[in-house]
Image: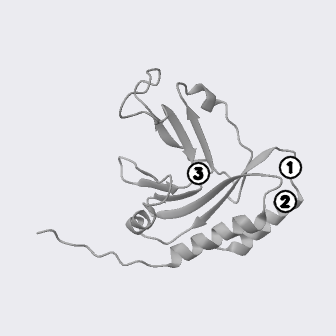
Amino acid sequence: MNINAINKRLKILKKNWPNKKSILFRHRFTIDENQMHIFKKYIDKDDFLYMRFPDKEKTLIGYGQAVKHISKNSFSQFSDRKYNIKSNVKSDHVDILGGAGFNIKKSEEYPWEGIPAVQFTIPRFLFSFIKNKMHLTYSCLITKHFKINELLHEFEELQNSLSYKTNYKKTKIK
């Protein structure tokens, strides 16, 4: 993870802010981490998401929220969303994870009270395992007044977290 490259991108962005209200800043890294290791390390994080596709060639593990969309009864508000994306990947696409209830028009009843009928999230940290490629994508919705040091601090914490190896012991149940 090259924090200097991120710092350079952020400084250029701050200096040459486009005429936009907000930007979805994204930075993708190639990583060399075991999928199960990532799952075990981050499963207790807030807003943890896990999606494994049926062909088992693609797995997404994410946590935190760069963007969150909630609705009580409609998908229509999501279809018109557009983001000004600044990424280090030329043809970047955004993975939006979430879901909806079976009948989003029906009022909430026990035990589903307080759970949104429709919710989608762009994870702040998204690990993607696609065939033999492993990436970590950081996403953050920023405005002109963002603080570079705060974002760099997140990267440093993530880098420390990734470099810290944990030993998980399997316990047999008799």
Q: Return the x and y of residue 142 as percentages of the image width and height.
A: 74, 52
- Up the image or down, 111 lies above or below 166; here it is above
Q: Return the x and y of residue 34 as percentages of the image width and height.
A: 42, 69
The residue drawn where x is 53% and y is 28% is 72
Q: Give the number of the mark in front: 3 or 1.
A: 3
The residue drawn where x is 43% and y is 67% is 41
Disc with the residue nearer the chain's start (3 vs 2): 2
Pointer 3: residues within 10 angstroms few (<14), some, or many (20+)? some
The residue drawn where x is 68% and y is 70% is 153
Q: Amino acid at mark 3?
A: Gln
Q: Secondary structure at mark 2?
A: helix
Q: Could you say which disc has been placed on residue 170 in the image?
A: none
**Outermost residue, top side:** 105
Total labels drawn: 3
Q: Could you say which disc has been placed on residue 14 in the image?
A: 2
Question: Residue under circle 1?
Answer: 18
Pointer 2: residues within 10 angstroms few (<14), some, or many (20+)? some
Distance Cα–Cα, label 3 vs label 1: 24 Å
Disc with the residue nearer the chain's start (3 vs 1): 1
- Up the image or down, 9 lies above or below 106; here it is below
Q: Return the x and y of residue 44 as percentages of the image width and height.
A: 44, 61
Q: Amino acid at mark 1?
A: Pro
Q: Secondary structure at mark 1?
A: loop
Question: Residue under circle 3?
Answer: 65
Which quarter of the figure is the C terminus placed in? bottom left
Q: Amino acid at mark 2?
A: Lys
Question: Which of these two is toward me, 22 or 31?
Answer: 22
